[in-house]
Amino acid sequence: MREAANRSFLADAKKYIRHSRTSLAKIYLAKKEHMSVSTIHEAKTNLSRLIQKAERGEEVVIARGKTPVAKIVPIKKGKKKRIPGMFKGVFKVGPEFFEPLPKDELRLWNGEGD
């Protein structure tokens, strides 16, 4: 019976080691990619600094102990607004653009044939 308990303990220990190796590997990769890694306590204390890092384009990983649990990333800025007339004079649209399509081509656009 004691032997079975030892096997169970060893199996649990192996799972823990495998899990902690994975966590350490994630932190190692985060540091290798030049992401800063902070614990939850550090993140609470220095949240405004971590946000400033994100604003500069850095990614910050927050870890609970040795396990990464969250990432602060910069939000991508939206596309610039379109300005009417910004391509005026860059290209020209000929009068044929406004002519109706031939019947056979119009039929194809409407999905009525091959």
Image: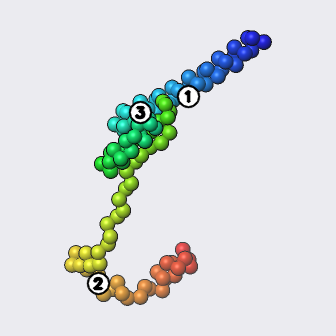
Q: Of all residues shown, which one is farthest toward the right?
A: 1
Q: Earlier in the sequence, mark 1 or mark 3?
A: 1
Say which residue label 2 marks: 94
Mark 3 or 2, closer to the camera: 3
Kind of residue at badge 3: Leu
Q: Secondary structure at mark 1?
A: helix
Name the quarter where the C terminus is drawn: bottom right
Q: Residue at x 37, y 56 (%)?
A: 76
Q: Secondary structure at mark 2?
A: loop
- Out of 80 and 68, give the one closest to the viewer: 68
Q: Of all residues shown, which one is farthest toward the front?
A: 45
- Out of 29 and 99, give the one closest to the viewer: 29
Q: Secondary structure at mark 3?
A: helix
Total number of numbered discs in the rendering: 3
Q: Residue at x 36, y 37 (%)?
A: 36
Say which residue label 3 marks: 29
The picture places residue 12, in percent across and down from the top left corner, at 64, 22
Name the quarter where the N terminus is drawn: top right
Q: Residue at x 60, y 21 (%)?
A: 14
Q: CA distance from mark 3 to mark 2?
A: 56 Å
Q: CA distance from mark 1 to mark 3?
A: 15 Å
Kind of residue at badge 2: Gly
In the image, residue 55 sits, relative to residue 65, either above or below, namely: below
Residue 19 bears which disc, if any?
Answer: 1
In the image, residue 1 sits, relative to residue 22, either above or below, namely: above
- Out of 109 and 56, give the one closest to the viewer: 56
| Residue 43 visible in the picture | yes
The picture places residue 87, in percent across and down from the top left corner, at 25, 75
Kind of residue at badge 1: His
